[in-house]
Image (spheres, rainbow, N blue to C red):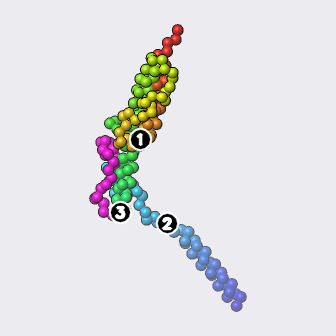
Amino acid sequence: MRLMRAMLLGMSLLGASATWAAAQSVVAVQWYQDEDDRQAFREGYRQGRWDAQHGRRADWDDNRWRETDDRRWYREGYLRGYREVGNYYYDGRSYAESARRFGYEDGYNDGRRDRHTGHSFRPTHDDHYEDGDRGYDRRFGNKSYYKHVYREGYRQGYERGYNSGWRSY
């Protein structure tokens, strides 16, 4: 009887270890699709890039997709494509470059004027700096970022314009 129990226990352990070993060799199958593989996402991405490159306002409402999931993927693709182009380029120039250039020009002119009229060095006092939005277009996206970059350029231009009137003797 003991022998029979020992054999049953041995066979059970052997069977369990074989099952465990077989379970370890099973490869998990992933049934999701990567977002870049979805047709709706790819079409949205292409359209978003095209709209941004041609200066069009972001508009991802595409009724071609009837399924809610596909509409969501189209919108996600559109926004990604639009942001990749739209946040960086406008008329062949980056938004940040435009903001910095406008800020620098305004700062330089205000700095020269302040120096010429005898004002003290005050790069954050003028209205241009306060407003910080000359040249901004709503297609550029985030206005506070535009103002931040504009003001950086303004401070640099102001310092250069203010100090350009100094003469060393």
- In this picture, is 167 found above or below 136? above
Say above or below: 69 vs 120. Answer: below
For the record, the magenta segment spans: 48-68
Q: Is residue 61 magenta?
A: yes
State the residue at coordinates (39%, 30%): 102
Characterize the local packing of mark 2: few (<14), some (14-19) or many (20 or more) Cα atoms within 10 angstroms.
few
Three-letter code for the amino acid on which mark 2 is drawn: Ala
The furthest residue to the bottom? 1
Q: Is residue 121 left or right of residue 109?
A: right
What distance separates the C-alpha of mark 2 from that of mark 3? Answer: 28 Å
- Which of disc 3 and disc 2 is earlier in sequence? 2
Q: Residue 68's mark?
A: 3
Q: Position of residue 53 (x, y in %)?
A: 32, 42
Name the secondary structure under disc 3.
helix
Q: Which mark is residue 143?
A: 1
Of circles 1 and 2, which is in front? 1
Mark 3 or mark 1, which is nearer the start of the sequence?
A: 3
Residue 124: image location, x then y, percent: 49, 29
- CB under 8 Å between discs 1 and 3: no
Residue 99 coordinates in the image, percent (x, y)? 41, 34
| Secondary structure type for disc 2 | loop
How many other residues sit within 10 Å of disc 1, few (<14), some (14-19) or many (≥20)? some
| Identity, as a three-letter code, of the amino acid under mark 1 | Lys
Residue at the disc numbered 2: 28
